[in-house]
Image (cartoon, helix red, strand yellow):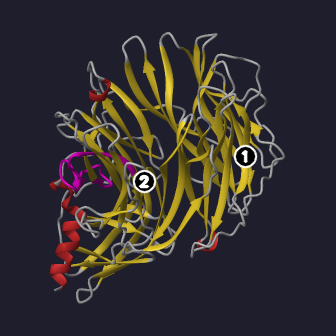
Amino acid sequence: MKKQSVFIICSFLFGVNMAMAQWVSDPSVNTLLAGVDTAYAYGEMVGNSHDSASYLLYYKSTFPNPPFFKLYLQKIDYHGYRKFGNDGILIDQGPNRTWVAGVAVVPNQDSCVYVAYSKVQFYPGPEDTISAIFMNKLTKNGVKLWGDEGIRISRGSTTCSSYSPYLLATEDNQICIGYITIDSVVTPTGSLPNVILKKLSATGTLVWEYTFNKAFAEFNWGVSMYPMANGNIMAICRHDSTNFNDTSFLQSLWAQKFDANGLPLFAQPKNILSYHKYTGDYPMTMVHVESNSEDGFYIGASYDVGEVTIQTFVQQIDANANALFSEPVPVIIDEATNLERTDFGIRYLPETQELMVVWAEKNFTTHEASILGQKISSGGTRVWGDSGKELYPKISMMDSTYAFLTLRKSGLNESILFFMKRITASTAIFSYAIKLDPSGNSVWGKTALLSDKPGKNIALMALEEVGGQWVAYYTDQMDSAYYHKSMGQLFGQNIFNNGNIGVGVEEIVSVSFPLTVYPNPASSNISVELELGTLFNIQASLWSPDGRMIRSWEFSKVPFEQPHLFLDVKGIPDGLYVLKILDGNRRSTAKVMIRK
C-alpha cells in the first residue's frame, strides 16, 4: 500500500509531461492556454494558492451559422501545462450563447472550483430572448459535482433576464454570488437593472438572499463583494437616479455589510461616493476597490466630466462603510481637456497606509501617451503633487500608445505593473511588466518583455502572485474583416519576482536513487525516505522556482536501518520548491509543496 501511495504521489508531482504546453522563455512564442482550433476565444482566470495552479473559464466558437458558443474550464499548472486536455472541460453547450463570467476557488485544501455564467437562449423573434445565470462546482481534478449542466441560479424569461455574475468564496467554504437582473419595467431609457445577492452552501442549496431595492427611474448596476473579519462580507454596487427631463444622472456607490448568516448589518445601504448631474459619454465605473488592514476599503471611481476628459476620484471607508474623506479626492488636478484616462489600478501600501494609483493617459492636444501614478495618503492628500508622477516615458500617439494596465502586489509594498504598448505603425501590440517600489521607481532597472508574439494581442490581464510567480494572459487578435471573428486564442506568460520569464521549477534531471518525500504538501517538517544503504556526507537543499537556494542541510552519516532525513521547513513561504539530495556523485530531486 505504501509503495502504491508513493507511486500516486510521484505521478501527481512528476506527471506534468503528459499534458500540452509549458511556460517558455521566448516572448515571441508564449504558451497557448486555451482556444485551440477556434475563431473566437475570451476568458476569465483565477489563481489557486493551494496547488499553485490557475483556472481559466473561457468560451470559444468556430462560428458556424448561427454562431453557437461553448464554455470550457481549463486548469493551468505551475509550469504552464494544460491539465484538462487541449480544450479543457466542457461546461456548457447547445443552441445558446454562454458568456464567460465568474470563476472562484474555495479557500480550503479541497480547492474546489466554482464557475458561474450567463446563458442566453435564442428563439425565433427578437422578443423571445431568455437570459439566466447558471453555476457549477468542480473538483480540482475536473469532476462536476452539481451535475453535467450545473444548477440554475436565476430564472430567465421574456420579461426578466439576468447576467454579469460575481463570485466570492467565503471562509466557511460556501460561495456567494451577485448578479444583475433586468425586469419588464420600461422607462424612456429602457428596462432598469437590479442587483441580487445569494449565498449557497457547499451542496448548492440557498443559504440566504438579498436584493438592493430600487424605485422607478432608478437602477442598480454591477456588484462586487469583499471578505471581512468574522466571516462578514461587504457588498458594493452602483446606483443611478435618472432625470428624464434633462437626461442627467445622479450616480453613486452604495455599500451593505452582511454577517455569515446573511443578516444586513446596516439598516439601509450606505452611500459611499456620489457624482451629480453626470452627462458625459462614459459611465462611472466601480472597478477599483482595495482593502486595507483594518477591514476598510479604498474606493476609486472614474467618470467623464465632458469633452473627453476622464477624472478619477478616491474615497476611503472604514469597516462600517463610513466615508473617511470629507470629499472624494481627485488623483490629479489639471485644467486640460481632451484627455482620456483609462485602465486605473490601485494598491494599498501597508507600511505607509497610502494608496498607489496608476493609469494610462492619452492627450489628444499634444498627441502623447504616458503611464502616470499618484499616491493618496490616509488623510486624503495627494503625495506626488497635483500632476502625479510619470512612471513610464511619454510616447507619441502617432507611433504607439499604452493600454490594458493591471497593478498587482509584490511583497508588502512593491507592485508589478502589467501593460500593453501598441505600435501603431506596425499595428503590433506587445506586453510588458515593470516592478515598482513604493516611490514609483523601477526595482528591476528594466522592463520585462512578456510578449512580442506576431499579431494583435489584446486584453492583457494578470493574476495575483501564486506559488512565487505571476501569470499574465491575453487574447490573440487575428486579421479578419469581421470584429466578432477577430479574436482567436488565449496565450499566457509567467514572470517571477526577479523579472525572469519562463524559468519554472527544475524538472527531474536524473534519479540516481529512489526518493520518497512526505508529507507533501508540508507545513513545518519534511521526512525524506532514502533506499541507499549506509550513506555519508549527504547534502540536502531547497530551491525556489527562480533558482535561489532557500535553505540547506548537511548530514555526515545516516544509519542503514533508518534511512530518513528530517528537514525543518518552518518559516519558508508557501509555494512549490525543488528538493535536491546529493550523495557524492549521486543525485536525486523531488518537487515539494509547502503550505501552512
Helix, strand or loop for disc 2? loop
Helix, strand or loop for disc 1? strand
Can residue 587 be seen?
A: no
When asked about the image quadrant of residue 258, the answer is bottom right
On the picture, is 592 further left or further right than 148? right
Which numbered disc flags the more N-terminal residue, 1 or 2? 1
Q: Which residues are magenta?
A: 74-101
On the picture, is 261 further left or further right than 20? right
The residue under label 1 is 273
Locate residue 496, reporting x and y percent: 43, 46
Please report the residue visible at 48 percent of the width from the left and 50 percent of the height from the top. 183
Question: Which numbered tag is attached to residue 548?
Answer: 2
Mark 1 burial class by Cα count in 10 Å: few <14, some 14-19, many 20+: many
Nearer to me, 80 or 422: 422
Determine if the magenta segment contains residue 61: no
Amino acid beneath label 1: Leu
On the picture, is 132 further left or further right than 172? left
Q: Residue furthest bottom?
A: 561
Question: Eyeballing the image, is 102 above or below 320?
Answer: above
Please report the residue visible at 36 percent of the width from the left and 75 percent of the height from the top. 203
When asked about the image quadrant of residue 580, the answer is bottom left
Nearer to me, 233 or 135: 135
Question: Eyeballing the image, is 25 above or below 471?
Answer: above
Q: Depth-wise, is mark 1 or mark 2 nearer the camera?
A: 1
